[in-house]
Amino acid sequence: MQITDYFSQLCQHCGISALSVTEVDTADKKEVLISVDPEDAGMLIGRGGETILSLQRLARASFASQFPGQRLVINVNDYRQQREEKLTQILRDVAQRALDTNQSVAFPLQISSAERFFVHSKLTEMTEFSSLESVSVGDGRARRLIVQPKKVNSDE
């Protein structure tokens, strides 16, 4: 079975009319783009993206042998791009507050490990916040992201 057929049938079984299901290949990633009516998107995305992450895990387990060496990413109605834009804006606000106060500031959302990785990476790209760092604290669902001034190593 092709992965596009898999998701088309999954949508059909859930009572969702998929407008389109397409694959986009790059050297290291296969992205499955699912387009549905905006009213139905929430059923595939879930609260905080939990459902889309579960669908992605299921698809990885089911289709891993078909895509060796490629990361599989599921995206519904450009949710991932919209979420990254939102996380970037929140990060800017949090980082500016940490810079202004010279204190640690907690990221206000509980985010997945993939989103924490995105935020950590994004902060390192933002040259205006080069004096800040991000760290993850806690365990499991209680894991949180903190933006703080970089610690100065006195051994240098």
Image: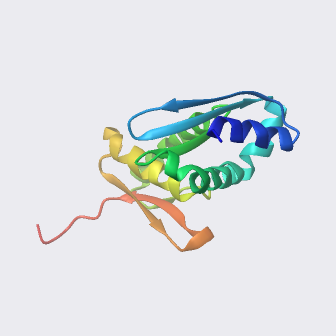
Residue sitting at x 62%, y 69%:
141
Q: Can you name the residue that lies furthest to the left here?
A: 156
Residue sitting at x 52%, y 59%:
113
Q: Can you name the residue that lies furthest to the right here?
A: 15
Residue 90, percent from left and from top: 55, 44
Residue 30, percent from left and from top: 50, 38
Q: Can you name the residue that lies furthest to the front here?
A: 1
Viewport quadrant of the N terminus: top right
**Foreground pick, 43 / 144:** 43
Marker count (numbered): 0
**Foreground pick, 2 / 151:** 2
Residue 111, percent from left and from top: 59, 56
Say left or right for 8 vs 119: right
Residue sitting at x 44%, y 45%:
70
Say left or right for 98 vs 83: left
Which quarter of the picture shows residue 134? bottom left
State how the image is colored: rainbow
In the rendered image, the vertical position of residue 4 relative to residue 14, given as above or below? above
Say left or right for 130 vs 34: left
Viewport quadrant of the C terminus: bottom left
Residue 31, percent from left and from top: 54, 37
**Foreground pick, 3 / 74:** 3
In the rendered image, the vertical position of residue 4 relative to residue 149, given as above or below? above
Q: Can you name the residue that lies furthest to the top here?
A: 19
